[in-house]
Amino acid sequence: MKDKGLLVVISGPAGAGKGTIVTELVKNENVEVSISATTRSPRGQEKDGVEYHFLSREQFQEMIENDGFLEYAQYCGNCYGSPKKQAVEWMEQGKDVILEIEVQGCEKIKKQNPDCISIFIMPPSLEVLEHRLRKRATDSEESILNRLARAREEIRLAENYDYIVVNGPIEECVYDVKSILNAEKLKAKSFDINTILK
Ligand code: 5GP
């Protein structure tokens, strides 16, 4: 039987560069990214079913009631949740599943799945983070200030994660995250010695 895939939580302040890293990771056919559901409106060129499943508050609530989420949380006034069914199927097929979620969601996932791996993507500094958020130019001034305030709170919680990767040059950051996933797969507890001693 194929080993179950890893459940990998990637968090970090909005604008820290998580999206770019995840795009690189999913180039591997054994890695999938979970598409979250959210009640926030699409930003820029975002399309339903690609970046997010964009739901009304009522639809989101219905998914909660049907036990459709691995976790869900509020972030800057909107709801975000990781759909359960697809993620569980992928892991059973032996694929690693990435959840790109904020810190409260990570805490919930860790409680339910103690074997998950959590990685915090840290911006090199708050100044760099602000610059990246402004360059993105898809958020209002109010939203940017809101996200910067939230970033400070999230950074305080980074020490609860298994790994912290500083997002400087993107190739280095992607290399670090791939190294973490490789090392996790090589852990003794992940090895079935019966495949050798049969
Ligand atoms: P954004 O609105 O910038 O796309 O996302 C805001 C925050 O919500 C980001 O930190 C992102 O990682 C987080 N997020 C996205 N999807 C989920 C989810 O399914 N669950 C939780 N808890 N957070 C999410």
Image (cartoon, rainbow, N blue to C red):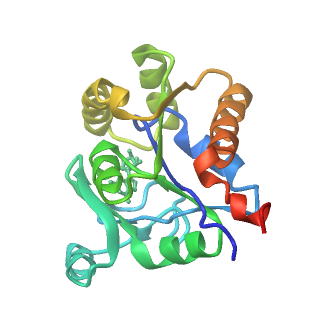
Find residue 120 and report its horizontal and vertical position in percent. Answer: 46, 34
Which residue is the extreme one toward the front?
A: 197
Q: Residue at x 52, y 67 (%)?
A: 47
Toward which corner of the image does residue 145 lie, by quadrant?
top left
Residue appearing at x 66%, y 49% in the figure = 185
Is 88 left, or right, of 83 in this rendering?
right
Q: Closest to the observer: 158 or 45?
A: 158
* Location of residue 71 with respect to 25 vertically, above or below: below
Q: Quadrant of the N terminus?
A: bottom right
Front residue of 56 and 118: 118
* Percent of width and height locating residue 61: 20, 76
* Residue 169 % position (x, y): 68, 23
Residue in the picture at 69% in, 45% down: 186
Measured as percent of width and height from the top left, residue 125 is found at 45, 15
**Residue toward you, 126 or 183:** 183
Image position of 162 (left or right of 32): left
Q: Quadrant of residue 55?
A: bottom left
Tell me if 169 is positioned left or right of 105 in this view: right
Q: Does 69 appear above or below 139? A: below
Task: Tell me the quarter of the picture where residue 57 sits.
Answer: bottom left
**Quadrant of image for the C terminus:** bottom right
The residue at 51%/37% (across/down) is: 136
